[in-house]
Image (cartoon, rainbow, N blue to C red):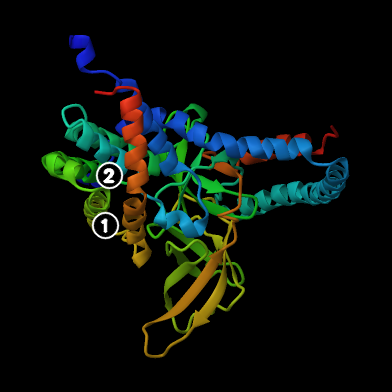
Amino acid sequence: MALAKQQGGVIILLTFIIALALMMMPMPEWAETSRPQWLLMVTIYWCLALPDRVGVIIAWLTGLVLDVATGSLLGQNAIGFAIVAFLAIKLHLRIRLFPQWQQALSILILVALYQIIILWAKGFTGQSAQTWAYWLASVTSMLLWPFVFTLLRGVRRFYRVR
Amino acid sequence: MVADHRQHHIETIRSIISVLVYPIQYLVNLPIAASEWMGDNLSSRETLREENERLRMQHLLFKAQLQKLASLKVENIRLRELLQSSKKIGENVLIAELLAVDLDPFSRQIVINKGTRDKVSIGQPVLDAEGIMGQIVHVGPFSSTAMLITDSNHAIPVLVNRNGLRAIVVGTGAPDQLNIPYLPNSADITVGDLLTSSGLGGRFPPDYPVARVTGVTFDPTQPYATVTAEPVALLERSQEVLLVWLAEKNAIAAPQDNEGMKDRVNTPP
C-alpha cells in the first residue's frame, strides 16, 4: 500500500524539465517579453493538485535552477517561486473549486506577484526593466492557464500521479 | 540573493547547478543546430562553389595583409622596446559556439559551449569577427554565460580612434544602443567615430573595435554632451565567438611567439 501511496515522481520531474526547456526556447525578439512563465505555472499546478508532494522547498529549488538557466541573480527566482508556492498551497482548496476563468484570474495575480518580487530584486541590483511590456508575461500566463491546467490534469490522471 | 550580489562564494553552487541545466540547454539548442546542419548539407553545389570562390579571394587578401602585419608587429615591438614601453601584445584565442537558448529578456547575456574544462574564467573578454562583444560573468564546467556590452550593467573603457580621446561606453539594455556619458560639451567627437578598447581597465585587450558613434548632441544647458553609439560586433547575429586570454608575458618575450605565428600562417597547406 505504501508503494501505491506515492507514484509518478518521474512524471512530475519530466513536466518540470519540459517547462524549463520552454523557458529557454529561442523566441523572436518581439515575443520575448511576453513569454508565459511556463515553469511557474507548472509549479503552481502541482502545488494545487498535490500540495503534500510539491511544496515550498521544491518550488525554491526549481527557482534556483531557473536562476542558473537564465543567468539571473542566484536566488531571485527562487524566492519568487517559494512565495508563490506558499500562497498556492495556502489557497489550494479554494482555487481548486473555482471555475477555470476564475482560476486563470488567480493565476494572473500569483504570476504578477512573482513578477513584482523579481522587479524588486532587479531594482535593488540596479537592472530594472523600464517598459510596460514586462507585465505581458502575467497576461499570457493567464490566457494559457486553461490549456496548461487541462493538459497537466490529463497527464496526472493518465499516469495516476498521486 | 544578497550574498550572490555582494560576494561571489556562491559561484560554485551556480556552476554545479549549471551542469544539471546544460543537458536541457543542449536539448533546446539541438533543433536549431540540426536545421543548420541540414542547411549546410543540402545547399546546392552552385552556392557552395560561389562561397568557396569568395572565401578563397578573402583568404588571399587576408594572407597578403597578414604578411605585412607580421613584419609590422615585429617592427612595432622593436620600436616600443626603444621607447621602453612594455605594451603587452600577442593574445591566445579559442573559438566557442553560441547555444541558442534565451535568457532573461531584460538583460543582454549569451550562453556559450565552453567552460572551465577549456580554462574559461570569469572576466574573460569575448569577441567576434567584428569587435568586442562582452565578457564572461558565470562559468560552469561545460558552458558559460557572457554579458554583452549592451547590458545595462556593463561598461568598457575606450578611446576615440581618430584622436585618442578617452571615454567609457555603457550599455543601455537595448540590443543596438550604447551610451557614452561624462563627455564635456567641448569634447572632440563626431558621428561616425570609431571607438576602440583602450585596455585601461586591464580586462579587455587594447585596440579592438567596440562601437561607432551614431549621435552627438551638445546642449549648453546640460553639463555633459549626449553621445550614443552602436556596437561594431554583430551581437545579435554571431554564431561563433572568440574567447581571448590576455598575454601574461611582456613585450620582450613576444617576438619569438610572433615568429612562430608567422611561420604557421605563411606555410602553404
Whether residue B193 is situated above or below residue A138 in the rendered picture: below
The residue carrying mark 2 is A77
Q: Position of residue B146 (x, y in %)?
A: 46, 45
Q: Residue B241 sits in which quadrant?
A: top right
Residue B104 % position (x, y)? 39, 50
- Residue B44 visible in the current orientation: yes
In the rendered view, tell whether residue B186 sits above or below residue A8: below
Residue at mark 1: A119
Is B21 on the left-hand or right-hand side of B63? Answer: left
Q: Chain of mark 2?
A: A
Q: Amino acid at mark 2?
A: Asn
Q: Residue at x 24, y 47 (%)?
A: B6
Q: Position of residue B20 (x, y in %)?
A: 39, 28
**Same chain for the residues under marks 2 and 1 in the image:** yes
**On what subunit does the disc labeled 1 rest?**
A
Q: Secondary structure at mark 2?
A: helix
Residue A101 versus residue A76: which sits nearer the camera? A101
Instruction: Find the distance from the CA under tag 2 to the CA under tag 1.
Output: 10 Å
Asked if residue B107 lies left or right of residue B128, the reply is left
Of residues A100 and A161, the one drawn nearer to the viewer in this rendering: A100
Q: Nearer the viewer, residue B202 or B16?
A: B16
Please, which residue is most extreme toward the left here?
A: A90
Question: Mark 2 or mark 1: which comes first in sequence?
Answer: 2
Q: How many marks?
A: 2
- Name the amino acid, label 1: Leu
Residue B253 in view = no
Residue visible at 46% across and 61% down in the picture: B157
Residue A155 location, x and y as percent? Answer: 36, 29
The answer to which image quadrant residue B151 occupies is: bottom left
